[in-house]
Amino acid sequence: MFNRLRKKPMTEEDTPVNKPSTARLNLFFFAAFVIFSILIFRLAFVQFVEGPELTYMETSRNTKDIPLAPVRGPIYDATGEVALAYSEPVQSLYVLLYEDYRNDERRQEAEELAHDLAAVFKQFNPGDKEQPDAEEIIKRLDLDYQKTFGYVPRLVKSDLSTKEIAFFMEKKAEYPGVMVLEENIRKYDPDGVAVQIVGYTREFKRAPDSIAKYKAIREGASNQRDPGLVYHEEEKVGFDGLELQYQEELRGRSGYQSIDIDARNLPDGTMLQTPPEKGYSLVSTINKEIQMAAQEAITDELRRLPKAITGYAVAMEVDTGNVVAMASMPDYDPNDWDYNKIKFVFRNGTTESFPPNDAKPSHAESVVLLGSVIKPLSVLIGLKEGLFTAGQTYHDQGYAILGKDGRQVRNSHSAYNGSITARRAIEKSSNAFMIDMVGKRLLNKYGSTKGVKVWDEHMKDFGLGVSTGIDLPKEYLGTLEYNNDETESALTRLAFASFGQQAKYTTMQLAQYTTMLANKGKRMEPHLVKEIRDADGNVVKEIKPKVLNEVDFADAHWNEVHKGMVTKVSSFDGFPYDYARKTGTSEQGTGPNKKENGVFIAFAPRDNPKLAVAVVVPEGGFGSVSASPIARKIFDAYDEVYGLDGTPKGKKDEAKDKE
């Protein structure tokens, strides 16, 4: 049985042949090709793309670059000679930790060093309680590495005296790890010139995320491979004004110390130092003499006025857009920076709004309703839109009637002006004319929605409610109540907007608008910087005049408006030039909370304008009383320095004295 079940032995002929199919072979070779292709591509990627990165990582494991703060460039006034902000070199004492001081024995050595250093400071500064004692020095040494790595030098004391510098340089061998390094501190003109424009600096570590450029620097820090662009936490950076706006230009490049480190993150070997590079300098358009005249004029008026506590003024050249003065008072001392003391004045009120605080009446609103200074533009709009003609008369009975309920809106002092033209309406500041001839007729022509829209478009064409283009951060664009107040009808909004009671704008916007009145329709971009220079004084960039947009109004319409800008202003008695001007008094609130804000605009000379000036004095009362004297002093100062007729009067006086 077993024999019958035994299989017959297989012969060579019976052996099966397993020949792979062509498809399987092709699949095998294709897979092999793909695998080798991926390997070759990956090797190439590692060599050519990731190679530099891997090389850097390999070297950086043993060598670290410690940033040294760059030398910040200066900011000059328009003469290029007066430094409004500058960096002053100081010598600082640093200690580099070569050992791990976290054990008791080593820590005792570090504490002995701290006591020695404290004794030296006391020796050269007897009786000075501001000198760091041993306990404070131990804290600054950060022996537990809670704040930074071991290889980063610890700042022990800034602004060493000459004797301290000489001592540590002479005793260098006795104090291993102690280094005297040159740093810079930021200083500002002691006269306090345009401090809200210039701005201030603070440590980079304090920069809030609301400053986008610093947030981006922090987020990209780990990928920054250029040591010159690395920001140190203690480095001073711009926080406001030109210091912030031109941070990249002013900063320069960080220096750095390259040092070998061991596995404990402690120094191991020699230290090589690459010095910082000085940043570019800015030549501003602000002339110190004119700026100081503006600041002093505002301060004088604030002393005289019973309710006013703040004042703002902007003086802008008509042809160039250069801002020669931009005053915001009261101001502060950037050399003595205390946020609690200056938090309500450290920003420039001509660019950013500060809401009123009835609980603290010492903090007034910085952006106010314009009042009658809008009337030249209202008339231009009326003429442009064909709402009336230049020669058409209007009977001004002292008030206009709004709505079916017979609500009356009166002129200032209920003044009865009789039969007046558009030109006379500007001169007499007729609210009634603006309501009946501009506000109502614009509504009748376009309807509610479009009527408000057309008004808004005209305002923005003149820079009111949009960015002026000023080279300052955080510009405030205004409060457009005619767009936002849905509780009032379109009639009421247009009627009140026509005489300056439905929108709040900055003094900078007001100055740009005045410049457009002067040059007949060119919206010039205002500039606070006219040149950027390198460390050798070479001009690397010149800021040239720029027209942002133009409006198309008939020349006859411009002339009609200019002729109407002749309101009597006693503070300009004896002014040697014919000039165009408009006073304004805007009202906010009612009853006991009613506030009257003084506003004034002007340009001179009338026929060949050189300078436009806008002044706002919140709660100053009539603009002719509170704001116009400030403008007069600014015009006089400009005439002395540059000459409203092209000839500086100061140079004329000097020539007479020599004779």
Image (tube, rainbow, N blue to C red):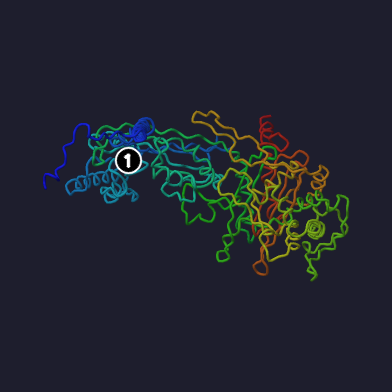
Rendered location of residue 92, percent (x, y): 35, 40
* Residue 6 drawn above or below residue 583: above
Instruction: Residue 53: tell me if it is visible.
Output: no
Instruction: Residue 327: tell me if it is visible.
Output: yes
Identified at 71% across, 34% down, the residue is 646
Rendered location of residue 65, percent (x, y): 34, 36
**427 or 233, which lies in front?**
233
Q: Which residue is mark 1?
A: 93
Asked if residue 135 lies left or right of residue 186, the reply is: left
* Residue 272, quarter of picture: top left
Alpha-carbon neighbours of circle 1 within 10 Å: few (<14), some, or many (≥20)?
many
* Residue 548, quarter of picture: top right
For mark 1, give the secondary structure.
strand
**562 or 265, which lies in front?**
265
Asked if residue 133 lies left or right of residue 463, the reply is: left
The amino acid type of the residue labelled 1 equals: Leu
Asked if residue 584 lies left or right of residue 49, the reply is: right
Could you tell me how many numbered marks the image carries?
Answer: 1
* Residue 546 drawn above or below residue 359: above
* Residue 20 drawn above or below residue 122: above
**638 or 19, which lies in front?**
19
Q: Residue furthest left?
A: 2
Asked if residue 575 lies left or right of residue 525, the reply is: right
* Residue 185, quarter of picture: top left
Rendered location of residue 508, percent (x, y): 64, 48
Quadrant position of the C terminus in the picture: top right
